Image: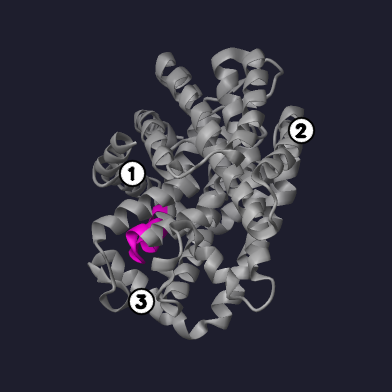
Amino acid sequence: MKIVSGINNVMWSGPLLILLLGIHIYFTIRTGFVQRKIKKAVKYSVKGEASEGMSAFGTLTTTLAATLGTGNIIGVSTAVYLGGPGGVFWCWVTGLLGMATTYGETLLSCCYRSKDAEGHNVGGVMYVLERGLGKKRLAFFYSFLICLSAFCAGCTTQSNAISETCMDVWGIPKWAAGIVVALPVGLVILQGVKWIEQVCMALVPAMAFLFLGGCIAFIFLNASVLPEAVLVIIESAFSKSAFLGGAVGFSVGRALRYGVARGLFTNEAGLGTSGIAAASGSEHTSPERQGLISMTATFWDTVVMCAITGIVVVMFVLRNEQALVDLPAGLLVKGAFATLPLLGEELIAVATVCFAVATLIGWSYFGQVAADYMGGKSLVRSYQYIYVIMIFAGAVMPMGIVWEITDFINIFILIPAVYALIKCRKNIWGR
């Protein structure tokens, strides 16, 4: 694990930060600041056509189901814990600029999508690599990595968060929580894409409003600290900060490293996964429109959710100076919610479970498309069974190294995804 940690520190402290931010900035400029079309994109996402394939809202909520996971809670907590308040700013910037990258990779995925054996629309970076660039081996490798990430980052991390939460708040044994989650999620997954879409459309808005409601309540009750929290976040992003009167110090490099890495983990802009859900949409929705719809997922996930979560965490630490010492990295949001006067711990527990379940379902579809690309329907069924087993395994296995593994896998998913994006970039602004 020291080797993995060492590689992550090298890659995420320089090369990949430059690559990722560079890609985000490049596509922001070359698309003419496509982020300015967010109002139109939101309208498209709720009024899209619904014929064959997923509806516009279905593709959006499936993407959000995969990205609005424990990264928005635990990931933001670790960004502040390990990178300082400045990590919140760089996480936010990654999301804001990453909207253009999401637009581009989604548009390409829709341009090069294909049909599976049952006639459903399928797409993603693997199809861009094969059909757009003739790189079938690289496409196969990318698909393998997506399946691996589905089992690890998309599955075991989420089920472990559920079991830890259930044990901590309600005293439910981890193995019992694993079974209770694996059975219904497994049922949804095995029923196919329509069930996945319907569950995501119902679950995602409900869980987002639940969590945001708790955050807004905390901010309202601690409004006097809000200006200081915002100032600390901005200052710490550009200068070495002495947080809490010099008790804890953070560098700009650490803020960048953990802010960008956690931003990527939450919104996945640059990994190409948003294109997998988007390509399943109706062919009557143009690639450009679908790109705008998927762009809103990055907006809601990071520009809104992670920013608000980060502000809550920094406000909580400013109010409770011992928090960075007394609490583990991933429990700062929980600590903030625990200060709410009514059912705070229960609220964050339910939100965590909902976020994790949504990610389990959303990421299962990403891996399913990748498995179908590698081996067709027979491999898809095997993948689905293994995925359900991994839900239970993740609930009971120790996960102390999970974030390092997640960052490590993302390195190898990011490279072919960015390669396809750059090589096919003319198809984005040449349309």
Residue under numbered circle 3: 231
Q: Mark 1 and 2 residues: CB-CB less than 8 Å, in contact? A: no
- The picture quadrant where one finds residue 215 is bottom right
> What amino acid is labelled 1 in the image?
Leu
Dot 2: element: helix
Task: Tell me if residue 28 comes above or below residue 134 in the rendering.
Answer: below
Q: Is label 3 in contact with label 1 (beta carbons under 8 Å)?
A: no
Residue drawn at (64%, 37%), measured in percent from left and top?
A: 285
Residue 187, which numbered label? 2
Counting residues from the start of the chain, the first of labels 1 and 2 encountered is 1
Could you tell me residue 408's position as x and y percent? 37, 36
Q: Is residue 193 left or right of residue 277?
A: right
Q: Is residue 409 magenta?
A: no
Q: Which mark is residue 20?
A: 1
Q: Residues within 10 Å of mark 2 (few under 14, many from 20)?
A: few
Crowd class of label 3 (few under 14; some 14 to 19; many from 20; radius 10 Å): few
**SS of the residue under disc 3:** helix
User: Is 88 rendered above or below residue 317?
Assistant: above
Please name the amino acid that badge 3 sits on.
Leu
Task: Count all numbered tags in the image, as a single digit.
Answer: 3
Q: Which element type, helix, strand or loop, lies under badge 1? A: helix
**Please, is residue 273 above or below residue 93 in the view?**
above
Residue shown at 30% from the left, 55% from the top: 256
Given residues 422 and 401, the one toward you in this image is: 401
Q: Residue furthest bottom?
A: 224
Magenta residues (range): 82-94
The residues tagged by marks 1 and 2 sit, at their Cα atoms, a distance apart of 37 Å
User: In which quadrant will I find the N terminus?
Assistant: top left
Query: Mark 1, residues whose alpha carbon is within 10 Å: few (<14), some, or many (≥20)?
Result: many
